[in-house]
Image (cartoon, coloured by chain):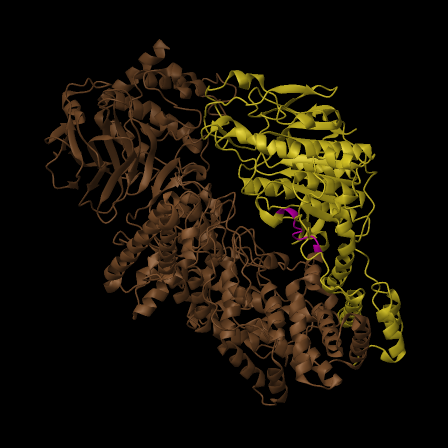
C-alpha cells in the first residue's frame, strides 16, 4: 500500500496548474451538469448580520422575510456538536411559536434551502413544510444543545415567496440559508493537492467504472446509489452510506471494490486494479475530499419524444385522405373508410335496415328511450328524402338526449353521490354537477369548453353570475375524486389526488397515468416526474371535505353566491346558525328542567319544551341562506410537489415543476403563473397539438353508437390497449371534432347519417368470417344498458317522471353519524330516469349491480354485457317489474276495447312493431289460458282480464327483442 | 315474411294445450314449431354441461373460504418463538406496509399443538386446532401486492392489477356443473369484500360462469321469491316468452348472447324452487346446527354460510365461495391486533363444523375446502398495537379433496418476515387447486384479445408435495 501511495503523490506533484485545469474541464465534459450552485441569501432570524461559512448573512432586521414568531435566546447552552463562535451565537438565538417564515422577493428559479434548528431544553417532535410540501416528518430535536442544519430542500418560489412552516412540537428556528441551484451544503475547504488527487485519480475512475450504473445518466440506476456527487455518494443507496469520510473500514464502497462481500462485488464485470483500489482507500482515508457540490439525481426513464410519438395514438393528428371506393353504397366519408376495410376482408356491407328498426335504434341511441307510437307513425308516414335526418335532429334537440349522453360521461368520470370513504359520506350537493353535465350535452357545449370548465371553471369567472356559478359547479368533476379511509390525522389526500390523476388520464387522454406514481411507466412514455408534475397542480388545489367518520362536517364547499353578497350572506348564515344554537340550548335547558320538576310545574315545563322543540325543528327546516357546490378552489399555498419515492408520501424526493408531458405537446407551468395550474392544464389537454384528447373522445362517441369502439379499450390508448380497427377513420372523426368547434352533436350527425350506421343488423352471407363483426358488415346488435332497461319499463308504464329530478332525499346533515361499521347506505325509489337515481360509491345500487351498471369507484370506459340468472330473476320477480306490468295492462285496456287493437298496441308499445299473425295467435291463446287460471281467484271478470294482460306484458318484458336493439 | 314460422302446422288447440301443460319449456311445442324448417339451428350445446377432466380428479368441487382484510400468520398458524422473545426490537424489514423498519410486535396468543400431528395453532382457533389432522397447512404462501384491493383481486383472479376471470369462473368454465338448476358458481357474500364484484366476475369468460352472489336473510338471492300467487301463471308466461324468443332467435342463429339469455330464464325459474330448498336449514337436525354454532331459524352469520355451503356442495354446485368480512369490517388490524380475536371467534367453530360435517357425510374426500386471505401481517408493529400488510409470506390451508391432512408445507424465517423454504406463490396455489380438480392449469385456456389466457398467466407450479 505505502509505495503505491507515494507513487500517486509523486505523480500528482508533476501536475502543473494548467494541466489541472484541463483535467477539470475534461472531467466535467460529456455530461450536462447544472451550473454551480451560488449562495443567494442567509438570514440570522434573531440577531445581527453575521458571517457563516464565509458568506454574509443578513440580520433579523432584514426586510427580505416576514416572521411574527416570538424571539428566544440562551447563549449559555453548550451546543452539541460544538461549532464556531459566530455560528453558535446565531444558533442559540432563535424564533419559535408561530413557526412560519416567509422569504420574500425571490426571483423565479430552483433553490436549495437549509434551516438551522436547535433544542434549548427537551426534545420536541415536529414536521417541516416548504411551500406547503412536507419535507420532513417526525423530526426529533434531540437533547439540550443539539443543533442541526436541516436540508437541503429543493424549492421554487411561489409568487416570489418561499414559506417555511412547522407543525407539532415547539421548533426553534435559528437561521436560513438559500442557494441558487442544487447545492448539497457540505462546505469543506479542499486543498489544491487533494483536489488534484481527486481529479487525476478518483473522478476518472468513478466515471469509467461506476457511472454506467450509478450516476444521473445511468439508464437504470442500481441500488439507488449515485456516485456522481459528494452528497449522494455519502448518503449512499439502499444498503447505506457508500463513503464514510476518513473511515475506509466503514465505507461500503471499499467493501464492494475489494470483493469482500459475495453479494456486493463492484464493478461486477471485472474487479478494479490493486492500484485503483489503493487510490480509493487513500482518498477515503484523507476524508474523501470531493468538489462535486451539486447534488445529482437520477431522473429515471428518459423519454425520446420523437421515438415515443411513433406509437399510433401519439402520432400527430392530421386529417387522413378519404379512401376511394368504387361502390354506390357509401353515403358519407365515414362509409368510404369502413368499406375500404370490408373490401380488404372480402366482406359486403348489409342492406339498409327497415324503418321501424332504424327508428328504434336511433331513438335508443340518442335518448335511451323507445320511440313513442306517434313518433313511429310519423316516421313511417314521412316519405321525404330527409326523413331520417329530421328524426336525428329532433332527437338531438330533445332534453332526453343530454340525460342519455350525460350519463355516458358520468360513467367515465365515475360519478357518485357519496364520497367513497369507509363510511361513504353522502354529498347532497353532488347532483348539481350531474345536472351541469346533462345540460352541457343538451346545449352542445364545445368539448374544449367542457374540459376547461371541469378542470378550472372556478378560475374562469363568467359573463354573468349564473355562468360563473355554473363553472364552479363544473369543477365537481375534480371534487368528486374518491375519498379514502376513516382517519383524520394523516388523511390520505395523496390517494384522492391519485384518483384525480388516474381519472384525468383515462378520461381525457385514454392513459393509465397512475402506474407512474411509483415508477416510470413500464409501457408508455410517462415518467414519475411527469406524474408529480401533474400532482403539484392538484396538491395546489383545495378539495372540499365531505365529512368522514371522525370529522363529520362538510367544509370548503364553494358558496354559490355573488362575490359582492358573500359577506352579507355569510353573516346571515352565521346568524341563522347562532339562532339555531340558541333554540337548541333552550330545548336542552327545558329538558333538564323537566327531569327535576314535579307536579304542575312539570306539566307546564313539558308544554314549554314541546313548543321549544317545535320552534327549533321549524328553524332547522329553514332553507340555507345560500347554496354551496361540491367544487374545488385554489389552495392557499400553491407549490410544486415532491416525488413520493415508490408512491410513499412519507418518502419524498425531488420537487418537480408542475408540467404536462412534453410527449403530449405539454410544457412547464410558466413562472408567472400564480394559480394552481389547472387553467393551463385544461389548455394543454385541449391543445390542437395534443393528439389524444380528440382521438379518445371521437372513439367514445363511436363506441356508444356501435357498441364497441374503433379502439375497443376506450380508456386505454397506450401500449397495453387494443389497436384501432379503423385507425384512419378514427383520425378522420377526431379531426372533424377538433377542427369544427369541438361539437359533439355535429359528430353524432355525421355518424348517424352514414350508411354503416343505417345497415341491417342481420348477418349477411359471408359474414361468418368475421363473427365478432369488427369490420362492420352489419349493424352490431346489442343489449340495452341498465338505464335504458329501467327507463323503458317506466316509459311503457306511462309513469316516467320527466320533471327536473333535483336533489336526493338524504337525511339532514345534522343527524349524520356514519362510521365504517355503519356506513351510509340507502336506496331512494323514484320514477325519474335512471340517471337520476342516487348512486352510492361503496354499496352499489342493486339494480346497477345486476345489469352491469357503471362502476362508481373507477372510470368505466366500456360497460360489460353479462347474462345472468339474476337478471332473469329480476324480470321474473322484482316488485317494480310487476308493478309496471300492471300499469301497462291498464294502458292497454284504456287504449281500445277491441282485442286485436289491444294486441297490436302492446306489441308496438313494447317492441316497436305490430304482432305477426302467429304471435297474435299465441298471445291470444295465452290470454285465454291465463284468464282461466285466474278465474277462481278473482271476483270480477274485468280484474281477470287486466291480470291476464299484465301477465302477457310480463312475458313480453322478458323477450330478447325487448332488451336488444337490432 | 320469409322468416315467419310455419303457423299452419300449429293449431290453435295445440298451442293452448301446450301453454296450459304442466312442465316448463316443453320441448314438444318448440320442436313442432321448428320441425319443418330445414335451417332449424342445432340445439346449442349446454355451456355448463359437465366436462371431462384432463386427468382423474381427486376433488369434484371446491368450497373456497376467503377471510378479508389480511389474517396475521404469526398470530394464528405460524408459530415463531423468536418473535415472542424479540418483542420491541427493531426489524430490518417487515414493519408497517412490509418495507419499513419498525419495532417487532410479539403475538398476543399462545400456541398449542392440535390433533395427532401436533401442528401448533394459536388460541385464536381452538376448534380448527382440533381439525389439524385433516388440514394441509401452507405457511409459505406469498403474493405480489400489499394493497387489499390488488391482493384480493390477485388471490381470486391471479391478476393483481387488471380485472380477470375469477378462479370460480375458471373452474365453472373448465368443469361445467352437476346441477343445471343452480348456478355453477355461488358466492356466499353477505358483505362485499375489497375489489367488489370483480372477485366473482367471469370477466372475459362467457357470462354463464359468473358467480351468483347470495346475501342471506329471507330472500338470500335477490328476487328469488315468486311474486305471483297464482300457481302455473309464471310457467305460462315463461312458455310464451320462450316461444317468442325462439322465433326471434331463428333468423339470428349463432348469436350466443341471445341463446344464453333464453337459457338464463330457465335457470332462474328452477332456482326459485331449488335454491330455497338449499337455503332451508330447518331440514337440518339439532346436532348439525350445533356443529356450526347455529341457532334454529338463524339465516345469517358465518355459520349459516358454512352450512349452506355444505348443502350447495351436496347439490352439485361446482365452486362455492364464502366471503368472511367486508371491505370495511374485516381482519385489517392496523391499530390493535387484539381485535383479531373477534374475527377468529366468528369463523373458528363454523369452519371446524364444516370440516367435521363433510367428514361425517363422507364428502370431505371429494370436496376441497380452501381457507385463505389476501395477505398476512407484518412482524413489526403498525399504529399502536397493530400490524401492517404483508404479502411476502402468509398462511393458508387446504383440506379434503386429495390433499394430505396433518401436514405443513413451507417455512418462514425466525420472525415470519420472509419465506425460508418451499415458497408457494398465489399462482402455485391456484395451479394446485386446479390440479386437485383434474385440471392441468397450463391447458385450461381461453382465447381472448388475441391470446390464450390462463388463470395462472405464464406461472404456476403444482405443489405435488401436498397431494395425497
Residue B276 point in image, percent of width and height: 75, 51
Q: Is residue A316 visible?
A: no
Observer-nearest residue: A231 or A828? A828
The correct choice, above or below, for A899 with respect to A658 in the image is below
Chain with brown colouring:
A
B16 up-or-down from B402: above or below: below
Please give left or right for residue A935 compared with residue A788 in the image. right
Q: Is residue A192 visible?
A: yes
x and y percentages locating residue B247 in the rendered image? 79, 72
- Nearer-the-camera pick, B92 or A207: B92
**Image location of residue B213, percent across then percent down:** 67, 50
Stretch of the chain drawn in magenta: B199-207
Q: Mainly helix, strand or loop, the magenta region?
A: loop
Above or below for B428 versus A624 = above
Query: Image height check: is B78 above or below A951?
Result: above
In the figure, what tint was chain B given? Answer: yellow
**What residue is rendered at 71% in x and 61% in y?**
A872
Quarter of the image containing the N terminus of chain A?
top left
Label count reads: 0
Amino acid at each position: 500500500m505505502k509505495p503505491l501511495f507515494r507513487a500517486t503523490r509523486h505523480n500528482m506533484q508533476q501536475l502543473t496548474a494548467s494541466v489541472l485545469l484541463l483535467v477539470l474541464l475534461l472531467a466535467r465534459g460529456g455530461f450536462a451538469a447544472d451550473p454551480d450552485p451560488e449562495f443567494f441569501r442567509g438570514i440570522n432570524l434573531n440577531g445581527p448580520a453575521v458571517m457563516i461559512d464565509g458568506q454574509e448573512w443578513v440580520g433579523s432586521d432584514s426586510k427580505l422575510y416576514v416572521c411574527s414568531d416570538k424571539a428566544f435566546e440562551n447563549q449559555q447552552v453548550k451546543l452539541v456538536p460544538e461549532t464556531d463562535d459566530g455560528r453558535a451565537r446565531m444558533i442559540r438565538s432563535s424564533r419559535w411559536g408561530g413557526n412560519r417564515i416567509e422569504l420574500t422577493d425571490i426571483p423565479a428559479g430552483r433553490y436549495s434551502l437549509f434551516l438551522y434548528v436547535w433544542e434549548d431544553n427537551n426534545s420536541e417532535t415536529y414536521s417541516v413544510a416548504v411551500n406547503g410540501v412536507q419535507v420532513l416528518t417526525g423530526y426529533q430535536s434531540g437533547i439540550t444543545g443539539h443543533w442541526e442544519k436541516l436540508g437541503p430542500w429543493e424549492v421554487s418560489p411561489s409568487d416570489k415567496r418561499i414559506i417555511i412552516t412547522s407543525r407539532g412540537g415547539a421548533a426553534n428556528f435559528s437561521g436560513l440559508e438559500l442557494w441558487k441551484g442544487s447545492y448539497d451544503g457540505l462546505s469543506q475547504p479542499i486543498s489544491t493537492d487533494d483536489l488534484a488527487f481527486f481529479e487525476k485519480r478518483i473522478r476518472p475512475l468513478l466515471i469509467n467504472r461506476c457511472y454506467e450504473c450509478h450516476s444521473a445518466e445511468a439508464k437504470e440506476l442500481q441500488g439507488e446509489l449515485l456516485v456522481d456527487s459528494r452528497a449522494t455518494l455519502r448518503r449512499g443507496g439502499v444498503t447505506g452510506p457508500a463513503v464514510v469520510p476518513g473511515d475506509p473500514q466503514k465505507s461500503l464502497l471499499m467493501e464492494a471494490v475489494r470483493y469482500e462481500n459475495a453479494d456486493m462485488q463492484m464493478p461486477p464485470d471485472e474487479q478494479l486494479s490493486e492500484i485503483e483500489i489503493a487510490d480509493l482507500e487513500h482518498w477515503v482515508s484523507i476524508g474523501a475530499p470531493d468538489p462535486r457540490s451539486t447534488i445529482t439525481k437520477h431522473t429515471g426513464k428518459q423519454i425520446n419524444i420523437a421515438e415515443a410519438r411513433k406509437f399510433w395514438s401519439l402520432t400527430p393528428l392530421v386529417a387522413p385522405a378519404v379512401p376511394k371506393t368504387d361502390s354506390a353504397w357509401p353515403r358519407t366519408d365515414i362509409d368510404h373508410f369502413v368499406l375500404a376495410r370490408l373490401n380488404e376482408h372480402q366482406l359486403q356491407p348489409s342492406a339498409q335496415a327497415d324503418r321501424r328498426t332504424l327508428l328504434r335504434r336511433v331513438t335508443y341511441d340518442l335518448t335511451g328511450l323507445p320511440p313513442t307510437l306517434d313518433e313511429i307513425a310519423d316516421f313511417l308516414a314521412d316519405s321525404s328524402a330527409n326523413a331520417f335526418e329530421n328524426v336525428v335532429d329532433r332527437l338531438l334537440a330533445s332534453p332526453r338526449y343530454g340525460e342519455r349522453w350525460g350519463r355516458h360521461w358520468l360513467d367515465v368520470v365515475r360519478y357518485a353521490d357519496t364520497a367513497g370513504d369507509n363510511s361513504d359520506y353522502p354529498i347532497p350537493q353532488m347532483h348539481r354537477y350531474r345536472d351541469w353535465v346533462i345540460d352541457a350535452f343538451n346545449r352542445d357545449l364545445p368539448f374544449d369548453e367542457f374540459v376547461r370548465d371541469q378542470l378550472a371553471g372556478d378560475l374562469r369567472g363568467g359573463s354573468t353570475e349564473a355562468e360563473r356559478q355554473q363553472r364552479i359547479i363544473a369543477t365537481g368533476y375534480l371534487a368528486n375524486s374518491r375519498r379514502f379511509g376513516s382517519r383524520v390525522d394523516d388523511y390520505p389526500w395523496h390517494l384522492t389526488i391519485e384518483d384525480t390523476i388516474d381519472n384525468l388520464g383515462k378520461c381525457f387522454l385514454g392513459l393509465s397515468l397512475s402506474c407512474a406514481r411509483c415508477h416510470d411507466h413500464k409501457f408508455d412514455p410517462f415518467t414519475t416526474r411527469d406524474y408529480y408534475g401533474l400532482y403539484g397542480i392538484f396538491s395546489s388545489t383545495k378539495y372540499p371535505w365531505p365529512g368522514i367518520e371522525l370529522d363529520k362536517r362538510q367544509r370548503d364547499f364553494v358558496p354559490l353566491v355573488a362575490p359582492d353578497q358573500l359577506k352579507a350572506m355569510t353573516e346571515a348564515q352565521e346568524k341563522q346558525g347562532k339562532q339555531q344554537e340558541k333554540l337548541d340550548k333552550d330545548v336542552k335547558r327545558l329538558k333538564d328542567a323537566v327531569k327535576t320538576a314535579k307536579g304542575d310545574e312539570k306539566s307546564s315545563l313539558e308544554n314549554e319544551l314541546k313548543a321549544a322543540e317545535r320552534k327549533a325543528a321549524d328553524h332547522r327546516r329553514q332553507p340555507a341562506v345560500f347554496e354551496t357546490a361540491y367544487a374545488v378552489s385554489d389552495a392557499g399555498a400553491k407549490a410544486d410537489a415532491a416525488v413520493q419515492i415508490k408512491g410513499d408520501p412519507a418518502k419524498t424526493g425531488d420537487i418537480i415543476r408542475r408540467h404536462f408531458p412534453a410527449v403530449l405537446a405539454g410544457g412547464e407551468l410558466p413562472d408567472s403563473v400564480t394559480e394552481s395550474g389547472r387553467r393551463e392544464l385544461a389548455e394543454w389537454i385541449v391543445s390542437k397539438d395534443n393528439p389524444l384528447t380528440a382521438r379518445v373522445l371521437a372513439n367514445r362517441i363511436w363506441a356508444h353508437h356501435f357498441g364497441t369502439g374503433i379502439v375497443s379499450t376506450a380508456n386505454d390508448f397506450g401500449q397495453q390497449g387494443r389497436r384501432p380497427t379503423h385507425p384512419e377513420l378514427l383520425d378522420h372523426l377526431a379531426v372533424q371534432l377538433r377542427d369544427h368547434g369541438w361539437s359533439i352533436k355535429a359528430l353524432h350527425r355525421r355518424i348517424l347519417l352514414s350508411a354503416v350506421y343505417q345497415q341491417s343488423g342481420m348477418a349477411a352471407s359471408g359474414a361468418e368470417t368475421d363473427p365478432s363483426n369488427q369490420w362492420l358488415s352489419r349493424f352490431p346488435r346489442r343489449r340495452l344498458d341498465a338505464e335504458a332497461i329501467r327507463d323503458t319499463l317506466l316509459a311503457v308504464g306511462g309513469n316516467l317522471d320527466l320533471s327536473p329530478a333535483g336533489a336526493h332525499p338524504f337525511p339532514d346533515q345534522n343527524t349524520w353519524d356514519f362510521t365504517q361499521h355503519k356506513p351510509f347506505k340507502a336506496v331512494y325509489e323514484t320514477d325519474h330516469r335512471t340517471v337520476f337515481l342516487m348512486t352510492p360509491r361503496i354499496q352499489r345500487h342493486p339494480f346497477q349491480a345486476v345489469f352491469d351498471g357503471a362502476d362508481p369507484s373507477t372510470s368505466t370506459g366500456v360497460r360489460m354485457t353479462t347474462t345472468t340468472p339474476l337478471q332473469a330473476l329480476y324480470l321474473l320477480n322484482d316488485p317494480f317489474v310487476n308493478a309496471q306490468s300492471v300499469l301497462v295492462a291498464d294502458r292497454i285496456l284504456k287504449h281500445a276495447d277491441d282485442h286485436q287493437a289491444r294486441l297490436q298496441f302492446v306489441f308496438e308499445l313494447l317492441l316497436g312493431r305490430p304482432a305477426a299473425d302467429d304471435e297474435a295467435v299465441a298471445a291470444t291463446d295465452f290470454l285465454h289460458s291465463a284468464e282461466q287460471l285466474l278465474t277462481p281467484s278473482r271476483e270480477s271478470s274485468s280484474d281477470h282480464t287486466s291480470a291476464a294482460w299484465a301477465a302477457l306484458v310480463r312475458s313480453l318484458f322478458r323477450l330478447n327483442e325487448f332488451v336488444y336493439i337490432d | 315474411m320469409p322468416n315467419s314460422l310455419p303457423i299452419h302446422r300449429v293449431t290453435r288447440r295445440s298451442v293452448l294445450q301446450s301453454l296450459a301443460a304442466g312442465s316448463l319449456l316443453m320441448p314438444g311445442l318448440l320442436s313442432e314449431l321448428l320441425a319443418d324448417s330445414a335451417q332449424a339451428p342445432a340445439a346449442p350445446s349446454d355451456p355448463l354441461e359437465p366436462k371431462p377432466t384432463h386427468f382423474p380428479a381427486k376433488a369434484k368441487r371446491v368450497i373456497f373460504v376467503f377471510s378479508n382484510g389480511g389474517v396475521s400468520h404469526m398470530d394464528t398458524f405460524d408459530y415463531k418463538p423468536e418473535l415472542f422473545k424479540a418483542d420491541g426490537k427493531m426489524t430490518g424489514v417487515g414493519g408497517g406496509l412490509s418495507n419499513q423498519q419498525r419495532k417487532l410486535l410479539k403475538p398476543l396468543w399462545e400456541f398449542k399443538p392440535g390433533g395427532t400431528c401436533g401442528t401448533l395453532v394459536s388460541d385464536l382457533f381452538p376448534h380448527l386446532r382440533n381439525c389439524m389432522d385433516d388440514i394441509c397447512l401452507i405457511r409459505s404462501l406469498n403474493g405480489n401486492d400489499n394493497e387489499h384491493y390488488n391482493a384480493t383481486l390477485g388471490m381470486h383472479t391471479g391478476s393483481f392489477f387488471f380485472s380477470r376471470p375469477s378462479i370460480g369462473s375458471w373452474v365453472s368454465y373448465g368443469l361445467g356443473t352437476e346441477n343445471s338448476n343452480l348456478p355453477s358458481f355461488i358466492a356466499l357474500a353477505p358483505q362485499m369484500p375489497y375489489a367488489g364484484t370483480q372477485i366473482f366476475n367471469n370477466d372475459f369468460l362467457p357470462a354463464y360462469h359468473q358467480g351468483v352472489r347470495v346475501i342471506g336473510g329471507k330472500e338470500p338471492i335477490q328476487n328469488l321469491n315468486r311474486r305471483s300467487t297464482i300457481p302455473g301463471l309464471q310457467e305460462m308466461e315463461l312458455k310464451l316468452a320462450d316461444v317468442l324468443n325462439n322465433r326471434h332467435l331463428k333468423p339470428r342463429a349463432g348469436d350466443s348472447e341471445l341463446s344464453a339469455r333464453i337459457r338464463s330464464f330457465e335457470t332462474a325459474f328452477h332456482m326459485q324452487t331449488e335454491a330455497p330448498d338449499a337455503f332451508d336449514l330447518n331440514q337440518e337436525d339439532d346436532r348439525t346446527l350445533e356443529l356450526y354454532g347455529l341457532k334454529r331459524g338463524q339465516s345469517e352469520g358465518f355459520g349459516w354460510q358454512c352450512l349452506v355451503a355444505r348443502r350447495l356442495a351436496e347439490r352439485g354446485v361446482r365452486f362455492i365461495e364464502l366471503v368472511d368480512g367486508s371491505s370495511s369490517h374485516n381482519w385489517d388490524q392496523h391499530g390493535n391486533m387484539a381485535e383479531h380475536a373477534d374475527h377468529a371467534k366468528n369463523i373458528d367453530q363454523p369452519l371446524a363444523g364444516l370440516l367435521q360435517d363433510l367428514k361425517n357425510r363422507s364428502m370431505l374426500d371429494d370436496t376441497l375446502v380452501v381457507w385463505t386471505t389476501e395477505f398476512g401481517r407484518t412482524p413489526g408493529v403498525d399504529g399502536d398495537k397493530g400490524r401492517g400488510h404483508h404479502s411476502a409470506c402468509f398462511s393458508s390451508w387446504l383440506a379434503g379433496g386429495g390433499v394430505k391432512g396433518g401436514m405443513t408445507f413451507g417455512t418462514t424465517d425466525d420472525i415470519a418476515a420472509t419465506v425460508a423454504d418451499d415458497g408457494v406463490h398465489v399462482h402455485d396455489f391456484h395451479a394446485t387447486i386446479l390440479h386437485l380438480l383434474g385440471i392441468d392449469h397450463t391447458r385450461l385456456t381461453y382465447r381472448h384479445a388475441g391470446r390464450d389466457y390462463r388463470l395462472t398467466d405464464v406461472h404456476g407450479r403444482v405443489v405435488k408435495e401436498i397431494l395425497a
